[in-house]
Image (cartoon, rainbow, N blue to C red):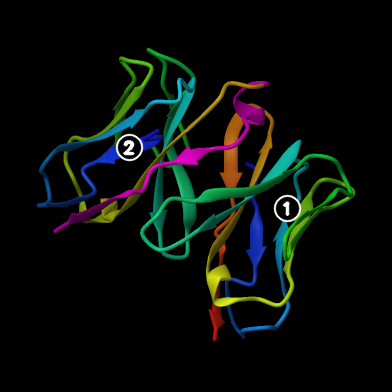
Amino acid sequence: TQLLEQSPQFLSIQEGENLTVYCNSSSVFSSLQWYRQEPGEGPVLLVTVVTGGEVKKLKRLTFQFGDARKDSSLHITAAQPGDTGLYLCAGAGGNTPLVFGKGTRLSVIA
Amino acid sequence: NAGVTQTPKFRVLKTGQSMTLLCAQDMNHEYMYWYRQDPGMGLRLIHYSVGEGTTAKGEVPDGYNVSRLKKQNFLLGLESAAPSQTSVYFCASSYRTGGIGNTGELFFGEGSRLTVL
């Protein structure tokens, strides 16, 4: 069974601070997706990383896929209250559907 | 474009009652999924379908049944609800790409909050 461990589980920071969220596994994934979920809504895809070592930027968000395709990180620069939400990573590969991590709940305080 | 629509959005059941959650998607997606989300547990896959007339078990299938009689609909049934099934249920769909293990973006509904007393 493929497992994805996300850390930290909870994060509360002040507006303007930087933060990094981690997604780790002992399994190799063909690709990894990051979703953000706001209260009362379903998750929405932010980015998909496919190549080992790949870095993708989405405005103030930077996503990196590990060289061995076992881990990924999400870095937010100058966090804003609008970044508040649950961040989920999900790994693809093998013969099973996406495997989701338990998520990191981020709260950005103005 | 409605995307993925779940009904009902809220439901309260008594232990032992049955109910069905309906998921409808208008994107012509081949793959559909039912997840449950509990505090601190992330999204756990209950059942999924790779096409009309096919279903498969996910990580936590016990106590649930599903049917995919039409491509656009995926039903999740609880035959005898238990308090442990209190959760928020999410339906999702995706295009068929390189196989179920390499699917692309999942499109989620807004969720159905179920409480079993």
Image-based side of A9 in relation to A40, left or right: right
At label 1, which amino acid type do we have? Ser
Task: In the rendered structure, find residue A46 and report the number of the disc placed on it.
Answer: none
Q: Is B103 a magenta residue?
A: yes
Image quadrant containing the C terminus of chain B: bottom left
Number of the front mark, 2 or 1: 2
Task: Please report the bounds of the magenta region as a residue range.
Answer: B98-117
Structural distance between the alpha carbons of marks 2 and 1: 32 Å
The answer to whether residue B62 of the structure is visible from this angle is no
Q: Residue at x 40, y 63 (%)?
A: A39
Q: Which residue is mark 2?
A: B5
Q: Residues within 10 Å of mark 1 (few under 14, many from 20)?
A: some
Give residue B70's quadrant in the image. Answer: top left
Mark 2 element type: strand
Q: Which residue is mark 1?
A: A25
Residue B52 image offset from top left, x and y in percent = 40, 14
Q: Residues within 10 Å of mark 2 (few under 14, many from 20)?
A: many
Classify A61 as above or below B48. below
- Depth order, front residue of B96/B14: B96
At label 2, which amino acid type do we have? Thr
